[in-house]
Structures are given as structure tokens and as C-alpha cells.
Image (cartoon, rainbow, N blue to C red):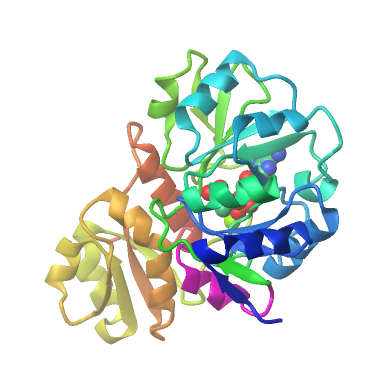
Amino acid sequence: METKRYTKESIDQAAEQLRKGEVIAFPTETVYGLGACAENEEAVKKVYLAKGRPSDNPLIVHIAKSEDILSYTDDFSLVTKKLMDTFWPGPLTIILPLKNQRLSKTVTGGLDTCAFRMPDKELTLQLLEKTGPLVGPSANTSGKPSPTTFDHVYHDLAGKVVGILDGGECQVGVESTVIDLSNEEEIVILRPGKIGVEELQQVVDVPVVYDQTILGEKGIPKAPGMKYRHYSPTTPVVMVEKKDFAQAIKHYGKEKVALLASDDVIAQFPNEKVFSLGNTLQEATQRLFAGLRTCDEWGVETILAEAFPVEKESSGIQRAYMNRLEKAAGGNQFLA
Ligand code: TXA
Ligand code: MG
């Protein structure tokens, strides 16, 4: 199968393919998604096949306007409405109870809830207007870092999908924050993303908490996708704090490592194989997946990636960065 590049100019053709039941990747502000019409079960099955994704892992349904959800759920509560009005379009996925069976088990993993999100990307909102709701898991091979450019998607899925809508580089760089609103006494963050407790708590009165299974803690995550090894390049990744890089490079061998680190760290080790994470957490998060993919192609023995340890007051973006890095590293940290 030839994988075609679609752009703003050819968006109508991409929409037509999707309506016919084909699979097309689309850009969002977080990462690229792998699209198929949410109510077409055969099309949704092709998404799992292309990604090699376990079938008990439910998908996010992407929509162009909040009202689109009313085909599947009851009227919004005040809390839900407030969150949608404040954060949509944007990197927030909301899990709501379903009222009918219009979405197949293939989409929901057999749960009586479904995840919804309105992406903040004009091109993809236009696509959604033309196709109706689309499922959209990240458009990577299952287990690999999520794609933040057209090239990443092409690398993983060329020959497996009909096309990719090219929307340039993703601005956020990690997947959306996933919150469970099926119990309105408490809002639980199942997957950390750019929007953290602080931002959510400014908008709602009910307590917002992180699911205890997210970082290091024991138990089975409520978002099925969080239990899998994830975001992993083939090369082993080790987390290293800023102050420990000199020792870590010595330990793993100067010639055998790639550095994925902030500019101030890189400035100290100019002769190494390096990928810059910039100067801010925002930049680091936007570049993390691209960095893991690039370092993986250098044929080194170990990728030393900078850790920004999370504390109680840490922002959503820092928790999101560390959550993805911990998974890529399988929890491996250099202890000086
Ligand atoms: O930013 C994003 O969310 C990207 C872009 C493309 O929109 N999409 C994305 O989808 O990351 P995916 O499928 O890779 O991750 C969806 C996560 C998984 O961890 C899944 O288990 C969880 O959301 N999830 C989906 N439906 C759920 C439900 N009803 N209950 C609990 N968790 C759910
Ligand atoms: Mg994913």
C-alpha cells in the first residue's frame, strides 16, 4: 500500500478516504493521531492492526465541536461543560459515561465510558468537520515514542496506512492529559499532560487528584494504556540528573553514549553525540520524543536523558515529561 502525503490543499481527498473506511494519520497540538471513523468498526480495527496495539486498550474519540458528544453521552453536567469551555480545543481528554451502543467495543475496550477530545489544530478541526468523529491513538508503532512530525509517522507506518495529513511539528510534544469525569465527587488524572492539577483546580471546585498508579507507585492503572511499556527506543535509556552527567558519561563510556539534555549540560560536553532539549521544560517536553527517536538512530549503547525530578508542587508539564521519560527508561536511573 502506498502511503500518501496529504496537505491543506488535499484535505478533501483525505476526508473522502476516511469516510470510505480507510485509516489516515492526522496532526494535533500534542502528537500525531491515527484516524478512522469512530462509528465504522471495520475501519477502527484497521487502526489496531496498523499500530500493533493490544485490543483491550480503548481509543480517544476526537470531535470538532462539544455538541458532537451528545450522540453518545447524556447532557453535560456543569462541571463537564466548564472544563470543555475552558480547555477545548486543547490537550485535555475527558472520560464520560456512555448512554448508548453507537461506539463499538473496539473503540471502548468494552468499558461503559469513552474518552473524548477536541484537538487544538485548525487543519484537523477542518478534517473532523468533514468526516465526523474520528478515533485517534498516537500514530506510532505500539511501544515506540509517539510521533511529533510527519516523518516520525512515515517511519513507523509507511505501507500500513493510506495516508498522513501533514501539519508540521506538534507544539506540545506529549499526549493530552486524560481525566476521568465518570465520578463527579472527584476528578482523577489518569495520564499527566500539559494541563495539570493547578490549571484544572482553578476552574472546578471538586478535588482534582493524580491517579496513584501514574508515577512509580504500585497498582493497576485505570487508563489501560498506562500499564504497557511505552515510548521506548531500541537503545536502553537511563535517566540522569543535571549534576550527575559527568559521572554518568564516565560510567557508561564517552564513546558509547548519546546525550539528550538541556543546553547548559550539552555545553559542558561538546564532543559527545548530543540532542538538545533546549532551555525550558516546555521545550524539553516538545522535543523529548523526537530526541529519543534521533538518539536511537546513532547506534550508541546507551541514551543518557536528563531527569527533572518531580516534587509535590511540580507542574503538569514536568509530570508529563517525567512520566514519559520514566516509561522510556523502564525506570532506570543513574545514581551517582
Ligand atoms: O494527545 C493525545 O491524547 C493523542 C492525540 C493523537 O490526540 N492521542 C493519544 O491516544 O494519546 P492513545 O490511544 O495513544 O492514548 C489514550 C489513552 C490510553 O492510555 C487509554 O488507555 C486511555 O487513554 N483511555 C481511553 N479511553 C479510556 C476509558 N474509557 N477509560 C480509561 N482510559 C481510557
Ligand atoms: Mg499512545
Write the start and end of the magenta stretch as one range. Answer: 147-161
For this rendering, which residue is in front, 191 or 214? Answer: 191
Residue 33 in the image: x percent, y percent? 58, 57
Residue 132 placement, left or right of 204: right
Residue found 77% across the figure and 52% down from its top: 56
Classify residue 73 by image quadrant: top right
Residue 336 in the image: x percent, y percent? 27, 61
For this rendering, which residue is in front, 112 or 45? Answer: 45
Q: Does any portion of residue 330 appear in the rendered image?
A: no
Residue found 33% across the figure and 36% down from its top: 314
Residue 294 placement, left or right of 60: left
Quadrant in which the N terminus is drawn: bottom right
Residue closest to the far left? 268
Relative to 84, say whether 23 is above or below: below
Q: Does any portion of residue 304 appear in the rendered image?
A: yes
Membership of 156 in magenta stretch? yes
Residue 25 in the image: x percent, y percent? 60, 63
Residue found 46% across the figure and 61% down from its top: 167
For this rendering, which residue is in front, 93 or 294? Answer: 93
Residue 216 in the image: x percent, y percent? 50, 46
Relative to 174, say whether 71 is above or below: above
Membership of 250 in magenta stretch? no
For this rendering, which residue is in front, 332 or 6? Answer: 6
Residue 274 placement, left or right of 66: left
Residue found 52% across the figure and 20% down from its top: 82
Relative to 180, say whether 261 is above or below: below
Q: How many marks?
A: 0
